[in-house]
Image (cartoon, helix red, strand yellow):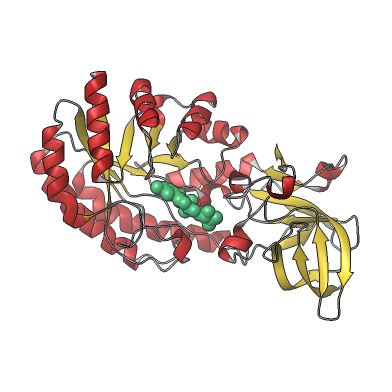
Amino acid sequence: MEYINNELCLGPLKKPLLPLVANYMRPIYVYDLDFIAQRFNAMAAALKGVRLFYAMKANSNPGVLQKLKSLGAGADVVSLGEIKRALECGFQPQDIVYSGVGKTKFEISEALKLGIYQINVESLPELERIGKIAREMGKKAAVALRLNPDVDIKTHPYIATGLKDNKFGMELSLVPALVDCLKSFTDSISLVGVSLHLGSQMLEFSGYEEALQRLKKVFLQLKKEFPDLKKFDFGGGLGIFYDRADLELEESLLRQYAEITLRTLADLNCELQSEPGRWLVAHCGALITQVQYIKETSAKTFVIVDAGMNHLIRPSLYEASHRIEPLKKGPAAAVVDVVGPICESSDFFAKERSLTTVQEGDFLAIMDSGAYGYSMASIYNLQELPLEVCI
Ligand code: LLP
């Protein structure tokens, strides 16, 4: 962690965070846009020739979206709300891939009206629904089949999506039925691609490589019958480290991931697409919170802060462990639990963590919370949403 004059800084340009709390009102998510640019450019260089559709569920802050758009990203969306936000931030319909298992009739017809680039279909009934709606509208829907290759990427069960007992994608054994369905909608559906997304926080790639191989075979099979098939979307999911700041190691994992992907798919001569979220934005954001009380009990010391699980749910939901740093470096460490004000015992950010001694009124940064932070926030307990600031 970078401190200059004992003050915490964020990102490659070492931007100081302390000025942000001058008129502090409530927890603040801060996003370093230069850091996002650095991450995007690194990924675009490693995945040369691949079209990157940023998975905006990770962070849909307008400043972040505009930045990524200006760098050349498209958007991967999962709701009409995300489509609208993407359009407001300058993305064109032709920059948008629409994923998600539960698209409503209304959402599908709006997407078709707008001319969204590609709809990633997640079930046979969804394919039929799209075929019928497009037919009624006199449109031709460009779809990719999201297939589920049934491989394990060894991540938290709540964020694994590529196993056959997950709700996502379609089993490979369904391909003949999908082909029949596509043939009955040749007027209203054009099969343009295949896609996969195995889950999030992937740090080891043997399952991923196997999945690419399996999907490649299906692509080649389908290609014989569907000449418009020209896109292969290999999903997102590349992981990061939350327990340390080791960007070099992350970039070397990125290179490994890119090498496997490009080596496996190069000879398909098709448009390669990816949907990264976390890797681009997680490190670039921090949640700033103020210490309210130091509460000593016979068992523990609790540092009670004004941010809660409603602002950043990752520790409660996945037992994720985010680094916590004081904005001003203090003296020697104590072992504490960092908890929020919410009326749930799962409202914690850290347990038995060694932390610089802090006092009431001090500020802490919960690091690496640029992905799945604000975008998963709620007003539980009628706590206000945090503020967001781009620097
Ligand atoms: N594509 C699809 C279809 C997805 O469902 C996701 C994430 C992504 C791309 C982007 O994955 P990423 O590159 O960010 O790993 N809330 C959880 C993560 C949920 C991921 C949901 N889908 C967390 O905080 O860990």
Query: How many badges with numbers are in the image?
Result: 0
**Vertically, is 111 above or below 42?**
above
Across and down, in percent, residue 111 comes to: 37, 27
Across and down, in percent, residue 334 comes to: 83, 75
Q: Quadrant of the N terminus?
A: bottom right
**Vertically, is 5 above or below 116?**
below
User: In the image, what residue occupies the spot 39% across and 61% down?
Assistant: 256
| Camera sees residue 231 | no
106 on left or right of 6: left
Q: Nearer the viewer, residue 49 or 183?
A: 183
User: In the image, what residue occupies the spot 71% across and 57% down?
Assistant: 366
Residue at the outermost left position: 224
Residue at the outermost bottom position: 298
The image quadrant of residue 296 is: bottom right
Residue at the outermost top position: 138
User: In the image, what residue occupies the spot 51% across and 60% down?
Assistant: 250
User: In the image, what residue occupies the spot 30% across and 62% down?
Assistant: 164
**Vertically, is 378 above or below 94?**
below
Q: Nearer the viewer, residue 5 or 195?
A: 195
| Camera sees residue 255 | yes
The image quadrant of residue 29 is: top right
Q: Nearer the viewer, residue 179 or 284?
A: 179
Across and down, in percent, residue 291 comes to: 85, 57
256 on left or right of 355: left
Q: Quadrant of the C terminus?
A: top right
Across and down, in percent, residue 214 comes to: 21, 58
Q: Nearer the viewer, residue 290 or 41?
A: 290
